[in-house]
Structure formats: structure tokens, C-alpha cells
Image (spheres, rainbow, N blue to C red):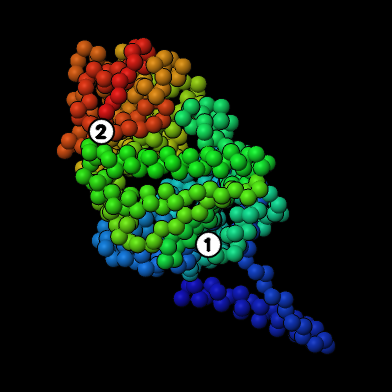
């Protein structure tokens, strides 16, 4: 009813204005009123010089036969997940018609990852009272067409069936309407999205990528850098009887296109070899082995992909049958807690922690100490509190009294807040308890009182531990980590539940899974940042 009233009001207003006009000027014939301006398409708001652009046409994806089959197979597990999503966002996937995302500029430093615009169009009017309720500032309600979120983000209520998530610094430009920048690197990608023929279109301007990607690339990545030295990259994908994808690399010169063709085909060869290695791994988990049939089909596709060059444009195409049976093992692992999907989530949590620590270092010149301490050096709060602003929890961080201990009457209330990045995803952890802990002291990555610099990691960041899944959980705000003693067994502090691998985070941001067969002496080597000892294979 509310939707009908809201949509009827403009018509009623027009009729009223028309009557007023004819009454005032009855000597003239009534003139037809001009039509209301057409709504601005989300794609029309994307500037052609954007660093990254993506458009998802979700209109019919949810009802696709393959997706419908997966929904039927995992109805119970999926419904639980969808209810959680709806609670946080006020929406379900079947409500979404399209999603359009762009970075005006590529993130270059801490906080820049928030400088994006995400436009969501729904199939019918959404509920303003509940949209993105889980991400709003505490007590925040709708005020005009703006809703404030955490971290300087906003929701702009663009229309009855569109809302836009963006940083407050981008609001003024967004409100100007359709972009005037229609010529640029993203021109082809935007044009492809406007046709409505593609389920997904992605465009990237590689020139906007951070210079560190090229300057600090590992030797094994050097052969693939030509792919990122192109003028533009455009990906198009569709889902019908087959899942099809096409990627185009636009090079500046024909010589560059030749290198792109060579690099892409080498990448496919490495992907083929990587899949073969996984399929031959006799030590693979039973859960991973369930994916083998699907991996074999994917490998057949990879073996057929060949880049084709025409002038300065290099194109590669791929297709695979839209068979739900190929996706079922992967979807099953994702939806069932305790499976490989949970380890993947834990791996992602650790990567976010690693990224936050790097961003903290970039902003402060050092890593955080193991604890926030008082003037006498007494530990008050964990390093996990110190990095809250770098995991999208700046508002929570500002609520802490940093000169009080974690269990003070004020801070203990905040300790009960669930921070998802610190929550182990295996299902058995209590709210407010974390198993993501660090080794402290005696040459470990964390010092009890002062922050360390990455150049003090003389063994290399790829050989030094930052954090692990610990066997024992602690309140996430409590400055309680694992004291490193080279003379005592350390392996017992790692979590190997049901003899499953333990996920560990290295100082370079990478995450690995290690088995309970890992030798204690080897673990001690990677705990220490500057012992000068070579690290053997962790496997």
C-alpha cells in the first residue's frame, strides 16, 4: 500500500498543477505538460576514466535452471545463510535486479578501499527502514535521502528501487547525476554493460594499479606483468545453457599485444599444471577430493583456452556446460560449517588481519605492540583493538577507553561485541572469543611493549609468522597472546581440531595450512623473525 501511495502522489500532484494552471489562465488552451525526466541509469553515472568498473545484471540469474537446482538441493543450508544476509542488508538475492560498482581511483593507501560507489537496483521498492540495517551507525535512522554507515560511508536513497553505497567524499559528485566523462579507458566496458546482453561486465584500467605491484613483483610473477601493462582489460560473462566468458586485453602497441598473448597462454599452462598437481595429491583432504570431478572438467576447459591476437587486441574465450552437478560439491563445502569452506573463511579472516597490520604499519611507521599499555608498561588492551580502524571498525575503536584495562566496567561491555574477522568460523566458538593469536617476545613478530618495523624481519616476511589459529581461545580485547620460549614446545599452541590443518598467517600477508605433523623445531624457525636460519619445506 505504501508503495502504491508513493508512486501515485506524483500523478496526483501533476493533475493538481494542471488544474491550477487552467484556472489561472482560462483564456488559453491547456498545454500538455512535459513528461517527467527519465531516471538516470546506474551505468550512466560511471565515468569512463574510472579505475575499476563492474556491472552485474542479476535479473534472471536467481531463476536460472542451474541455480534453481542448487537452491533446491541446499534449501535448508541456503535459507539459513539468506536469513543472515537479509538481517544485515534488508534484502535477499532474488530482490536484486542489478549491481553497479566502480572505483573512481584505485586505492593506494589505508582507507582508500572505502572510496567506491556501489549502486543497487531492486526489482521492486525496498524498505528504507531495514536496508543495510546491520551496517548503520548505532541508532542511525533515515534522514531525508541519506543514511550514515560506519567508516564514513553513506547510503544514498537514490529512488524507490535504487540505493547507493558510497563514501561521503563522493556524494557531491554522485548527486550531479549522469557523468560528463564519457570518453576513457572504461568506454568499451560501459558500452557492453549498457547493451543488457551480459550477466557480468568488468573493466580495469591497469595504469591505475599501485606501482609496488610492478616494482616488488616476485620473480615467478614477472612473466605475467605484461597482462597488467595493457591499456585496458574487459571481461564479459553470461549464463545460459553454458557459462561463457570472454576477456579482452587492449595494448598500447602491437609489440605489447604479442607479449600479452604469450603471457596469457603461459598462465593457462600453469593453471593446467596446478590443477594436475592438486588431482595427484594423495594427501588431499577428503573434502577437497570431492571437488576432483569438477576440477577435471575445469581442467578440460583450461586446456582449450588460447589467447588470440588481432592487432593491439588480445582475446581469450572459455565456456563450460551450466551443469549444477559440477557446482554442487563446491556449494556444499561453502554452506556446511566445519568443511573446507570454513577453512577458506578462516584464511580470509587471517588475510584481513594481515592487511590491517600492514595498513597500521603504513600509517604509523611500525607494527602495533602486542598490547596497548599504560605509562608503566602494564598491558591494557590487545593489538586486536589497535587495528580495529583498519578492519572497518573505526566506530567501535573510538568507543574504547584506551587508558583502561580490557575488563574495566566500560571496556568489558565492548568485549562482548562480535567482530566477524576475529570470529573463528567453525561453529564452536563463543561470541567475543577469538582463536586468532600471535606469538610474543624472544624474537617473534610481536614485542610485548613496543612496535616493530618490517625491516627488522631479517629472515624475510615470507618466513615469519604474524598470527595463527590458536588451540585456546581468549576474549578478543584481552592482551593475552602466546609467549614464545625457544626452549619449550610450541606446536601444542596451534589448533588442530579433529586432526585438521591449522591456518597460519605470515608477515607478507600470505596464509598457509599446516598439518599436525609439522615439526616443533620448524615452527620455532618461522616464529622467529631474525634467527638467520633457513626454513625447510613446511609440508
Q: Quadrant of residue 13?
A: bottom right
Q: Nearer the viewer, mark 2 or mark 1?
A: 1
Question: Could one spot residue 527 in this view of the protein?
Answer: no
Please report the residue visible at 24 percent of the width from the left and 46 percent of the height from the top.
289
Q: Quadrant of residue 323?
A: bottom left
**Quadrant into which the C terminus falls:** top left
Q: Which residue is mark 1?
A: 198
Instruction: Answer above or below: position of 358 versus 115.
Output: above
Tag 1 secondary structure: loop
Q: Is residue 339 left or right of residue 394?
A: left
Tag 2 secondary structure: strand
Instruction: Answer above or below: position of 358 versus 299.
Output: above
Tag 2 and tag 1, C-beta contact below 8 Å: no
Please report the residue visible at 22 percent of the width from the left and 25 percent of the height from the top.
518
- 51 or 480: nearer the eye? 51
Q: Which residue is mark 2?
A: 502
Q: Percent from the top left, x then y, of residue 407?
A: 29, 30
Amino acid at each position: 500500500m505504501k508503495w502504491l501511495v508513493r508512486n501515485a502522489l506524483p500523478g496526483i500532484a501533476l493533475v493538481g498543477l494542471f488544474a491550477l494552471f487552467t484556472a489561472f489562465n482560462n483564456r488559453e488552451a491547456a498545454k500538455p505538460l512535459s513528461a517527467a525526466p527519465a531516471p538516470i541509469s546506474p551505468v550512466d553515472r560511471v565515468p569512463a576514466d574510472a579505475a575499476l568498473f563492474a556491472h552485474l545484471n542479476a535479473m534472471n540469474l536467481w531463476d536460472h535452471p542451474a541455480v534453481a537446482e542448487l537452491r533446491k538441493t541446499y534449501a535448508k543450508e541456503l535459507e539459513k545463510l539468506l536469513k543472515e544476509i537479509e538481517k544485515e542488508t534488508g534484502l535477499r538475492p532474488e530482490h536484486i535486479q542489478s549491481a553497479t560498482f566502480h572505483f573512481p581511483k584505485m586505492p593506494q593507501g589505508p582507507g582508500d578501499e572505502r572510496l567506491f560507489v556501489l549502486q543497487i537496483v531492486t526489482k521492486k521498492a525496498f524498505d528504507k527502514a531495514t536496508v543495510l540495517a546491520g551496517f548503520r551507525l548505532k541508532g542511525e535512522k533515515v534522514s531525508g535521502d541519506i543514511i550514515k554507515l560506519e567508516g564514513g560511508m553513506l547510503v544514498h536513497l537514490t529512488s524507490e528501487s535504487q540505493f547507493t553505497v558510497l563514501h561521503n567524499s563522493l556524494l557531491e559528485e554522485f548527486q550531479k547525476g549522469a557523468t560528463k566523462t564519457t570518453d576513457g579507458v572504461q568506454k568499451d566496458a560501459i558500452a557492453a554493460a549498457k547493451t543488457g546482453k551480459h550477466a557480468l561486465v568488468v573493466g580495469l584500467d591497469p595504469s591505475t594499479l599501485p606501482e609496488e605491484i610492478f616494482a616488488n613483483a616476485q620473480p615467478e610473477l614477472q612473466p605475467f606483468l605484461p597482462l597488467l601493462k595493457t591499456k585496458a582489460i574487459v571481461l564479459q560473462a553470461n549464463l545460459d545453457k553454458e557459462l561463457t566468458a570472454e576477456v579482452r586485453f587492449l595494448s598500447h602497441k602491437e609489440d605489447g599485444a604479442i607479449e600479452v598473448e604469450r603471457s596469457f597462454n603461459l598462465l593457462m599452462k600453469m593453471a593446467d599444471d596446478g590443477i594436475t598437481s592438486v588431482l595427484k595429491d594423495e594427501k588431499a583432504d577428503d573434502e577437497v577430493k570431492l571437488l576432483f570431478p569438477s576440477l577435471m572438467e575445469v581442467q578440460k576447459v583450461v586446456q582449450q583456452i588460447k589467447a588470440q591476437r588481432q592487432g593491439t587486441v588480445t582475446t581469450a574465450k572459455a565456456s563450460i556446460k551450466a551443469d549444477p552437478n559440477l557446482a554442487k560439491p563446491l556449494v556444499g563445502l561453502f554452506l556446511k560449517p566445519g568443511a573446507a569452506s570454513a577453512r577458506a573463511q578462516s584464511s580470509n579472516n587471517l588475510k584481513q588481519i594481515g592487511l590491517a597490520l600492514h595498513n597500521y604499519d603504513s600509517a604509523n611507521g611500525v607494527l602495533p605492540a602486542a598490547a596497548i599499555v599504560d605509562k608503566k608498561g602494564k598491558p591494557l588492551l590487545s593489538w586486536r583493538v589497535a587495528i580495529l580502524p583498519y578492519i572497518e571498525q573505526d566506530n567501535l575503536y573510538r568507543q574504547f577507553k584506551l587508558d583502561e584495562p580490557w575488563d574495566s566496567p566500560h571496556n568489558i561491555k565492548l568485549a562482548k561485541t562480535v567482530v566477524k574477522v576475529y570470529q573463528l568460523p567453525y561453529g564452536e566458538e563463543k561470541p567475543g572469543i577469538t582463536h586468532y593469536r600471535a606469538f610474543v617476545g624472544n624474537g617473534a613478530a610481536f614485542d610485548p611493549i613496543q612496535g616493530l618495523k618490517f625491516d627488522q624481519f631479517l629472515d624475510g616476511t615470507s618466513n615469519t609468522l604474524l598470527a595463527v589459529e590458536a588451540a585456546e581461545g581468549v576474549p578478543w580485547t584481552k592482551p593475552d597472546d602466546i609467549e614464545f620460549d625457544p626452549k619449550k614446545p610450541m606446536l601444542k599452541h596451534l589448533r588442530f581440531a579433529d586432526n585438521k590443518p591449522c591456518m597460519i598467517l605470515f608477515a607478507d600477508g600470505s596464509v598457509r595450512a599446516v598439518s599436525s605433523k609439522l615439526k616443533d623445531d620448524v615452527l620455532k624457525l618461522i616464529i622467529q623473525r631474525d634467527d638467520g636460519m633457513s626454513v625447510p619445506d613446511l609440508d
